[in-house]
Amino acid sequence: MDIEVDRDKCCGVGNCVEVAPSFFTLSDEDGHVVLLQAHASLDDAAAVREAAAQCPTDAIDVVE
Ligand code: SF4
């Protein structure tokens, strides 16, 4: 699975960081999301999908 984030849509709530901290973090500079890994294995797919589902601004795109 491939992961993309739209930093312009991100409002820095941090739901994705709580759900999948090995994939998402927040920038110290602007508080917006930073993608740590652009690809997820099957083992991590559920957590990444959950992070995308919990993003209030639809800033996370998952490409299966
Ligand atoms: S859940 Fe969405 S809005 Fe919140 S930090 Fe992550 S990408 Fe940004």
Image (cartoon, rainbow, N blue to C red):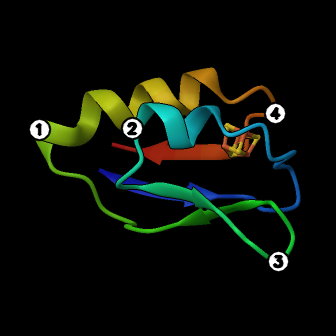
Distance CA(mark 2)–CA(mark 4): 15 Å
**Which quarter of the picture shows residue 44?**
top left
Residue under numbered circle 3: 29
Q: Earlier in the sequence, mark 1 or mark 3?
A: 3
- Horizontal side of residue 15 vs 36, given as left or right: right
Residue furthest toward the left?
A: 43
Q: Earlier in the sequence, mark 3 or mark 4?
A: 3
Q: Secondary structure at mark 3?
A: loop
Please name which of the two marks, 3 or 4, marks the residue nearer to the observer.
3
Residue 19 drawn at (x, y percent): 45, 31
Q: Nearer the viewer, residue 20 or 59?
A: 20
Q: Secondary structure at mark 4?
A: loop
Distance CA(mark 2)–CA(mark 1): 10 Å
What amino acid is found at the position of numbered circle 1 in the picture?
Answer: Asp
Q: Is residue 50 above or below residue 27?
A: above
Residue under numbered circle 2: 48
Disc 2 + disc 4, Cβ < 8 Å: no
- Horizontal side of residue 2 vs 56, given as left or right: left
Residue 56 drawn at (x, y percent): 77, 26
Residue 33 drawn at (x, y percent): 68, 58
Distance CA(mark 1)–CA(mark 3): 31 Å
Mark 3 Cα shell of 10 Å, populated few (<14), some (14-19), many (≥20): few
Residue under numbered circle 1: 43
Residue at horizontal 50 percent and vertical 34 percent from the top: 18
Please name which of the two marks, 3 or 2, marks the residue nearer to the observer.
3
Q: Which mark is residue 57?
A: 4
- Horizontal side of residue 11 vs 58, given as left or right: right
